[in-house]
Image (cartoon, grey):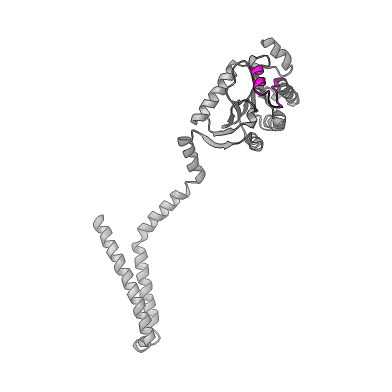
Amino acid sequence: MVMGNGFRYRAERISLGAMATAGIGVLLADVLGWLDRMAPGGTLPKITLLILSTVTLFLLMEFDRLKVLDSISTQISGLTLDGLTGELRRQHYLGVTRVHPEFPTAEFKRLVGGARREVAVLQTWIPNLDGLETELEKAVTEREVEVRILLVHPKSAVVDLRDQALRNTSSSVSVDASLDILHRLHGRLPRELQGKLKVRVYNSLPSIAVYKADEHYLVSSFLHGQLAIESTQIEIDGCDSVMGRQVQKELDTLWDIGHEVDLRDPARSIDISQ
């Protein structure tokens, strides 16, 4: 194989040298008027044919290499930037794709609009629920997506603690306000689809706030002095990524310990759960 490559390399160089020499020779002969004296009217076409034949021979010798380059080009074209970055995200960033300075309402609405299986929210209460109400309703009525909502139990000691953490802001914990919106939304849904909207309240220390649409998550923390939606939002892609699995586990854990809310009469069902 090495000897064959060496022979090909020498042959290529000889061919290229011959083409270059022939070109220079033809140019000089034409300037000096030799071509017309040697073969008037026929020399140039013959010389041109000779050079073209040499070029063709050279290309034939390079045919195998050109096929290899074409194969490499085809393989590279299949490696899109999204595919590469997606794999890098899973290996180096554990599924994290972006960090938002605050809750990206427009982006989450877009994700909800594309959801086909599940939308889930884990919060103490949902201060931006009225702005997401229309998208949640469309997800249920137009695509029969299951919507799961997790709120802190309004009688939990966590409510007072969170209220104190927000004492220097204009915000206060209002689980009842979120339940009122969900009650109205439930009433607007067709009877056969009302079961797609599920709400549970949990009596446990909140860990993270999560907004989920299929395999996309927006995750933030409960910091003092500001709402979770005003905090940095970590966007995660993939339930099977390291971060995605951890967030999904937390969602499932709180869902399992939560008490189901009857949205026909939320206040009464919550009182019974005490």
Find the residue positioned furthest to the front.
168
Residue 91 coordinates in the image, percent (x, y):
45, 35
43 horizontally vs 226: left or right: left
Q: Would residue 157 be counted in the magenta stretch?
A: no
28 horizontally vs 237: left or right: left
140 horizontally vs 4: left or right: right
Q: Is residue 98 visible?
A: yes
Q: Quadrant of residue 197?
A: top right
| Front residue (pair 273, 137) | 273
Q: Is residue 24 above or below residue 172?
A: below
Residue 180 coordinates in the image, percent (x, y):
74, 22
Q: Is residue 180 above or below residue 36?
A: above
Q: Quadrant of residue 207?
A: top right
- Residue at screen point 35% across, 63% down: 60
| Front residue (pair 97, 6) | 97
- Residue at screen point 62% across, 15% down: 203
State the extent of the magenta-drawn residues as a range.
Answer: 158-176
| Front residue (pair 86, 177) | 177
- Residue at screen point 69% across, 31% down: 132
Q: Is residue 141 visible?
A: no
Q: Quadrant of residue 213?
A: top right
Find the residue positioned furthest to the bottom.
37
Q: Would residue 169 be counted in the magenta stretch?
A: yes
Find the residue positioned furthest to the left.
3
Residue 34 coordinates in the image, percent (x, y):
35, 87
Q: Is residue 262 above or below residue 15?
A: above
Residue 12 coordinates in the image, percent (x, y):
31, 65
- Residue at screen point 75% across, 26% down: 188
| Front residue (pair 71, 182) | 182
